[in-house]
Amino acid sequence: MIKIVLTGGIGTGKTHLSKHFIEMGIPVFYADEEAKKLYSEPEVIRFFSSTFGNIVLSDGKIDFKKLSDLIFSDEKARAKVNQYIHPLLFESFNQWGKKQKCNIIMMESAIVFEAGLDHHFDKIIVVDSPMEVRLERIRKKYPHWSEDEIQKRITTQLSQEEKCKRADLILLN
């Protein structure tokens, strides 16, 4: 089975382009959506509770706003979360992949390099877009985010230039 990852920074248009791969018969695993499912698992909640206390919890569940505030302001906390979640996420991808009835599968993930998962893929496709376009897309999709929140998300990701250097294929969107 061939494993492809579709990656690129926030606002580059990964999700839009992934739909074209689905139309071509390539199933796509959406890392962000699947990670959010993991956050409701009891063992994951226990990890967050024991690691961060109630800082990221509300009513015994992961509070995504609190979690975002923490990981985009504290590099050590972000590293702890990534070290825990990304292996679980990749295992979910592998389990999902075994259920697919084709020879090619794809993961859509903004932070495959940052998570250290790039070596698990046969091909890496990076989606690239000019920063002005990216910012416009981000503001439209997340109107409640401040400019500071947007910049924090952009700067915590590997630069587009570096992602493109590591790509097998670059798609300008």
Image (tube, rainbow, N blue to C red):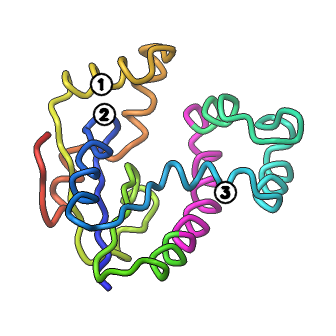
Q: Quadrant of the N terminus?
A: bottom left
Picture coordinates of residue 110, whole percent (x, y): 37, 49
Q: Rate crowding at label 2 as few (under 14), some (14 to 19) or many (20 or more) other CA atoms within 10 Å.
A: many
Looking at the rendering, the stretch of residues picked out in magenta corresponds to 72-92
Q: Are the residues at dot 1 and dot 2 in contact (C-beta closer than 8 Å)? A: yes
* Residue 66 located left or right of residue 11: right
Q: Which residue occupies the foreground of this view, 39 or 111?
A: 39
Q: Residue at x 65, y 29 (%)?
A: 65
Marks 1/2: CA–CA distance: 6 Å
With respect to residue 22, does 159 lie above or below?
above
Residue 130 lies in magenta, yes or no? no
Query: Which residue position holds label 3?
Result: 38
> Which of the two discs, 1 and 2, labels the residue nearer the N terminus?
2
**The quarter of the displayed image where residue 10 is located:** top left
Query: Which residue position holds label 2?
Result: 11
Marks 1/3: CA–CA distance: 27 Å
- Report the amino acid beneath label 1: Arg
- Report the amino acid beneath label 2: Gly
With respect to residue 88, does 94 lie above or below?
below
Picture coordinates of residue 40, whole percent (x, y): 74, 51
Query: Which residue position holds label 1?
Result: 137
**The quarter of the displayed image where residue 68 is located:** top right
> Which of the two discs, 2 and 3, labels the residue nearer the N terminus?
2
Picture coordinates of residue 42, whole percent (x, y): 83, 58
Question: What is the magenta segment's predominant secondary structure?
Answer: helix
With respect to residue 69, does 156 lie above or below?
below
* Residue 35 located left or right of residue 133: right
Q: Rate crowding at label 1 as few (under 14), some (14 to 19) or many (20 or more) other CA atoms within 10 Å.
A: some
- Report the amino acid beneath label 3: Leu
Q: Residue at x 43, y 61 (%)?
A: 29
